[in-house]
Amino acid sequence: MASSSQSVFNVFVYGSLLADDIVRALLKRVPPSNPAILHNYHRFSIKGRVYPAILPVENKRVNGKVLLDINVPELNILDAFEDVEYERTTVDVSLMDSSKTLQVETYVWVNKRDPDLHGEWDFEEWKVLHKGDFLTMTMEFSEEMELPESKTRVATYESFYAQEENKSKP
């Protein structure tokens, strides 16, 4: 949970949250944002998942954007969405429009030796292949969060994609 001393956060996003529809499904609004670069990190694809992971890698960079003015309840929603697979970490990013450095929160993959990480995740490809289903899953997760016995995002993801696989089988 967010510390109570800070009331507004800036959050660097680099995967599905680059899509305004996904952000809107979670936060019920699209916050202002700035394009930014996270240096010395790499954005990996994950075998069996449609979303990416980032980990520190020397001399690599991740292009993304900073969601500005995220309040504590919204940060808690993002924490729940990123779930146990990611750890919220404070990093410095370079804003593309001004080259200013900004200290932000981002979500780093917890398993640093994960054998399922490979290659580089591609947002444009994701938009074409996976965004529709992912948006449906995110809306289910968002509705689920309002229930007293809500499922975790990982559980929502796994049950949603298991249903999708069963639908596609003859």
Image (cartoon, grey):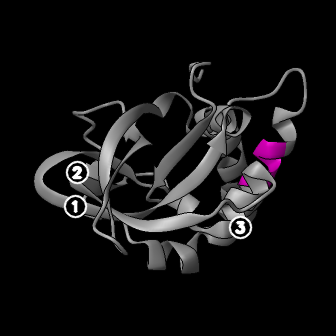
Q: Amino acid at mark 1?
A: Arg
Determine whether, in the image, residue 97 is placed left or right of residue 24.
left
What kind of element bears circle 1?
A: strand
Q: Choose between 67 and 135: the one closer to the eye.
A: 67
The quarter of the displayed image where residue 95 is located:
bottom left
- Residue 104 x %, y %: 42, 44
Determine whether, in the image, residue 150 is placed left or right of residue 83.
right
Asked whether the viewer can see residue 94, the reply is yes
Label whose residue precedes the other's in the sequence (2 or 1): 2
- Residue 140 in the magenta stretch? The answer is yes
- Residue 120 in the magenta stretch? The answer is no
- Residue 74 x %, y %: 70, 40
Q: CA distance from mark 3 to mark 2?
A: 25 Å
Q: Which residue is mark 2?
A: 41
Task: Say few, some or many: other residues with alpha carbon within 10 Å of mark 1 (under 14 / 14 to 19 / 20 or more).
Answer: some
Task: Say few, some or many: other residues with alpha carbon within 10 Å of mark 3 (under 14 / 14 to 19 / 20 or more).
Answer: some
Tell me the residue at 30%/46% (across/down). 92
Q: Which residue is mark 1?
A: 61
Q: Amino acid at mark 2?
A: Tyr
Q: Amino acid at mark 3?
A: Asp
Tell me the residue at 65%/52% (across/down). 161
Task: Say few, some or many: other residues with alpha carbon within 10 Å of mark 2 (under 14 / 14 to 19 / 20 or more).
Answer: some
Residue 16 sits above or below residue 143 on the image: below
Whether label 3 touches label 2, CB < 8 Å = no
Whether label 2 touches label 1, CB < 8 Å = yes
What kind of element bears circle 3?
A: helix
Label whose residue precedes the other's in the sequence (3 or 2): 3
Magenta residues (range): 138-142
